Image: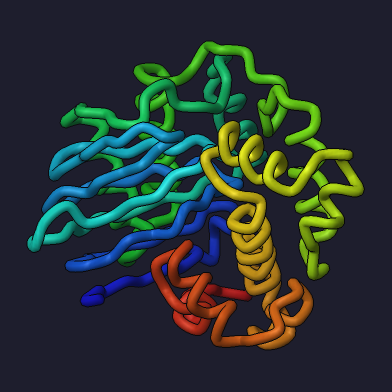
Amino acid sequence: MECISKAWKPHDFKDISLFKASFKQFQYTKHWHDELAIGIILEGTEGIDYCGNKLTTGKGEVIALNPSEVHTGFTCDEQGWSYRMFYFDMDFLADTLDSIHYKGQPFIEHPIISDKYIYKALIQLHQSFENTCFTLSRETLLLETLQSLYSRYGSNKNRSGKYNFDSYKNAQVRQFLHDDFAQNISLDDLCQLTGMKKHQIIRNFKSEFNITPHQYMIITKINQVKKLLDQNENITEASLKCGFFDLSHMSRNFKKVFGVSPGIYKNGLSYS
């Protein structure tokens, strides 16, 4: 895999995470984000598996991935792709949208957006978080960009909570994996919880969420590791607290989800 990547949090906006990368040969594992993820394709073409749909996006387009929706990204050709990403905390986003009197839901209606104005505004905003910039200029860019994005592409659909899963048994499994993410959970545990057979649990869960319970458990652990690193936890301690027996195993999975190693991610954080 050939890649150049950087992840960081601006010291004055703790609820926004930033990422940029150039990949030649790379494929993310299936995962989701707790935040709203907004990407800007700078060069090349990226393939996306989003909620089970195969999509492609290229230079000049914006990717909008709503929280908790399973997806992956991958190179489509030898050129690879370069892009920048925002990850907006949902509570922060709701407060920001309220401040600009946006009345819709804090979700984006379409995963691929072709809009030159929004594209340029997002690039300018992302660069303002990387380069020296007056605070007032950055705050103005942020509000104006989000207002334009949501006035054009915000969702008016009603969504009941963070997760919108219909199956009661699958929801039981999902909640158990979230609540006991640090444990070494087995299929027998899930059978005892649901009264279902092992093959039924795997088949039904994957049918609804496009991911197996095992994959869901790993990504849940990785997301929790990231949260601990955000709180200035030591990488080894974070790995152990989240139930990983092997630091290298955690690191490999972390990079498959976030595109950078835990060490590079932690080095990009500001704790001031």
Q: Pinpoint residue 42: horizontal percent, then vertical percent.
A: 17, 51
Please tell me whether residue 270 is drawn above or below residue 47 in the rendered image. Answer: below
Asked which quadrant contains residue 109, the reply is: top left
Q: Between 66 and 140, which is closer to the camera in this rendering?
A: 66
Q: Pinpoint residue 45: horizontal percent, then vertical percent.
A: 15, 48
User: Which quarter of the figure is the N terminus placed in?
Assistant: bottom left
Q: Between 214 and 199, which is closer to the camera in this rendering?
A: 199
Please tell me whether residue 23 is drawn above or below residue 65 in the rendered image. Answer: below
Q: Residue at x 20, y 27 (%)?
A: 115
The answer to whether residue 43 of the structure is visible from this angle is: no
Q: Pinpoint residue 232: horizontal percent, then vertical percent.
A: 68, 78
Q: Pinpoint residue 132: horizontal percent, then vertical percent.
A: 33, 66
> In this view, which residue lies farthest toward the left?
79
Asked which quadrant contains residue 182, the reply is: bottom right
Tally of marks: 0
The answer to whether residue 102 of the structure is visible from this angle is: yes
Please tell me whether residue 162 is drawn above or below residue 233 in the rendered image. Answer: above
User: Which quarter of the figure is the C terminus placed in?
Assistant: bottom right
Q: Residue at x 49, y 57 (%)?
A: 17
Please tell me whether residue 114 is drawn above or below residue 70 in the rendered image. Answer: above
Q: Between 151 and 64, which is closer to the camera in this rendering?
A: 64
Locate residue 59 relative to residue 192 in the image: left or right. Answer: left
Q: Residue at x 76, y 74 (%)?
A: 243
Q: Residue at x 16, y 43 (%)?
A: 58
Q: How is the image coloured?
A: rainbow
Locate residue 185 relative to residue 30 in the image: left or right. Answer: right
